């Protein structure tokens, strides 16, 4: 089971019951961010745990983000309104301490620039996160922990009624 988010902000989540592992989210993300279809350049990762679970991982916009706290060069800053972690490329030296600090495995180092890269929810894109927009099975959504919890409670209540 995925770790719960420690955020009040929006982030990308995946419904593993809908995800088919097509990796379109990774391709679309890499294209939106770099102009190339390359899953290694994506800021969202498809994760497969044998044949049992297929899901994705992206930044969870944690409160008091451990990645930002761990950065020895103060290169990661969290937007107080959106929770998005921004990487100051002038300060980042690719030490990867942020990667070690992230409980979700949602940060990568760009192989060309050697700098940290984190999902920014496609800030600046008029129609929001491209991975969510292009997911063929609607497995991805931009949500908050409160909205997820509310949906889970409704689902449990419906199941209880059906028993």
Image: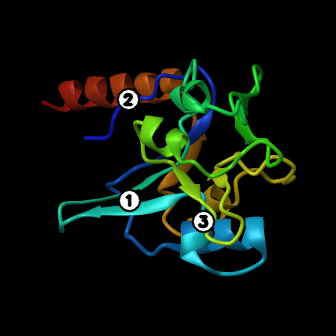
Give me the residue at 57% from left, 35% from top.
143
Q: Position of residue 1 (x, y in %)?
A: 25, 41
Position of residue 137 in the picture relative to residue 117 (left or right)? left
Q: Which quadrant of the figure contains the C terminus?
A: top left
Mark 3 element type? loop
Task: Categorize mark 3 by other alpha carbons within 10 Å: few (<14), some (14-19), many (20+).
Answer: many
Residue 56 x %, y %? 43, 55
Label 1 sits on residue: 18
* Disc 3 to disc 2, C-alpha distance: 22 Å
| Alpha-carbon span between mark 1 and mark 2 | 19 Å
Does residue 86 sit above or below 49 in this rendering? above
* Residue wearing tag 3: 42
Residue 4 disc label: 2
Mark in the foreground, 1 or 2: 2
Can you tell which quarter of the image residue 68 is in?
A: top right
From the image, state whether disc 3 or disc 2 is nearer to you: 3
Kindly identify which numbered label has been placed on residue 138: none
Q: Which element type, helix, strand or loop, lies under badge 2?
A: loop
Q: Is residue 122 above or below residue 59?
A: below
The percent position of residue 83, horizontal first and vertical second, equals 68, 28
Q: Residues within 10 Å of mark 2 (few under 14, many from 20)?
A: few
Verify CB contact (< 8 Å) between mark 1 and mark 2: no
Front one among 32 and 95:
95
Figure quadrant of residue 77: top right
Q: In the image, what residue occupies the spot 56% across and 47% down?
A: 141
Give the CA distance from mark 3 to mark 1: 20 Å
For the residue pair 67 and 42, the one nearer the viewer reads as: 67
Q: Earlier in the sequence, mark 3 or mark 1?
A: 1
């Amino acid at each position: 089971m995925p770790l719960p988010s420690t955020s009040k902000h929006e982030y990308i989540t995946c419904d593993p019951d809908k995800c088919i592992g097509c990796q379109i989210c990774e391709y679309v993300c890499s294209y939106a961010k770099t102009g190339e279809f390359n899953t290694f350049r994506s800021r969202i990762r498809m994760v497969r745990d044998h044949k049992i679970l297929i899901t994705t991982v992206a930044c969870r916009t944690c409160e008091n983000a451990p990645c930002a706290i761990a950065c020895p060069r103060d290169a990661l800053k969290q937007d107080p309104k959106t929770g998005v972690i921004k990487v100051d490329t002038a300060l980042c030296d690719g030490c990867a301490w942020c990667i070690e600090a992230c409980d979700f495995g949602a940060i990568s180092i760009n192989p060309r620039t050697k700098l940290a890269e984190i999902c920014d929810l496609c800030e600046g894109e008029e129609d929001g996160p491209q991975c969510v927009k292009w997911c063929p099975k609607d497995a991805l959504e931009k949500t908050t922990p409160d909205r997820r919890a509310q949906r889970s409670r409704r689902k449990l209540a419906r199941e209880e009624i059906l028993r």
